[in-house]
Amino acid sequence: GAGVSQSPRYKVAKRGQDVALRCDPISGHVSLFWYQQALGQGPEFLTYFQNEAQLDKSGLPSDRFFAERPEGSVSTLKIQRTQQEDSAVYLCASSFRLTNTGELFFGEGSRLTVL
Amino acid sequence: TQLLEQSPQFLSIQEGENLTVYCNSSSVFSSLQWYRQEPGEGPVLLVTVVTGGEVKKLKRLTFQFGDARKDSSLHITAAQTGDTGLYLCAGENTGNQFYFGTGTSLTVIP
């Protein structure tokens, strides 16, 4: 497709379950970002990749969160032993440019609800 | 923790009115962007400002980047119902990461 694709769009998990969220960026986009967004709030930075290298993971809330982008294209955000506070929309964005002023193209997000 | 504070958090105005949204930080950014987000969708870029003091106009929207590159404002003239949405500023640091503001939810009433 032409845009950033995220799956699943909606995920309901029981507390303690592991979840995996997938992001398929725009082809050729070098940079990939993951954000966590609560309802009505701005997205909070989680982690950032350039190609397959994870350059910044300072925003990951705990060691239960893990992200990878092994071949520099598709990325997966994994959350282990989910907790209720993990409920949020997880947004993925990609950008073509390595340097500043690159536009971020966002997917529609994956809404995670932890019961 | 978010580096950029937006105000107001919520804004409800009548169609035809003017409004200004503010984005403030104690950090310096190499560029600052404004996005608009509608329910169930990802944010969409409106504008990028790079130079301190820069002013950009897009139809009824005017964007300004502060001289010190720490703050920005978005002014909408004669708001329309189609302007309704969540407005987000995003600052880019020297490491090419983007940090978003707290968001301003705008509702324009017909």
Image: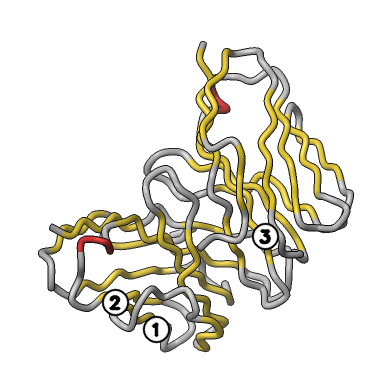
Q: CA distance from mark 2 to mark 1?
A: 8 Å
Q: Which chain does the residue under circle 1 lie in?
A: A
Q: Are marks 2 and 1 in contact (CB under 8 Å)?
A: yes
Identify the mark nearer the N-term, 2 or 1: 1
| Circle 2 SS class | strand
Q: Secondary structure at mark 1?
A: strand
Quadrant including the N terminus of chain A: bottom left
Query: Dot 1, how many residues are within 10 Å of its Cα: few (below 14), some (14-19), or many (20+)?
Result: some
Query: Residue A55: image x %, image y %?
Result: 56, 85
- CA gap between label 2 and label 3 equals 26 Å
Whole-percent x, y for residue B40 in the image: 37, 43
Measure the C-alpha gap from mark 1 to mark 3.
24 Å
| Numbered badge on residue B91 | 3
Relative placement, left or right, of A31 versus B67 is left
Labels 2 and 1 within one chain: yes
Q: Could you tell me which secondary element the residue under label 3 belongs to?
A: strand
Amino acid of disc 1: Glu
Tell me which residue sits at (67%, 71%) in the image: A97
Q: Residue drawn at (68%, 41%), measured in percent from left and top?
A: B22
- Residue labelled with disc 1: A68
Residue at (61% x, 39% y) in the render: B7
Q: Nearer the viewer, residue B62 or B101?
A: B101
Return the residue nearer the eye: B96 or B24.
B24
Q: Position of residue B33 (x, y in %)?
A: 68, 53
Residue holding disc 2: A78
- The chain that hosts pointer 2 is A
- For the residue marked with disc 2, what is the amino acid? Lys
Screen quadrant of the C terminus of chain A: bottom left
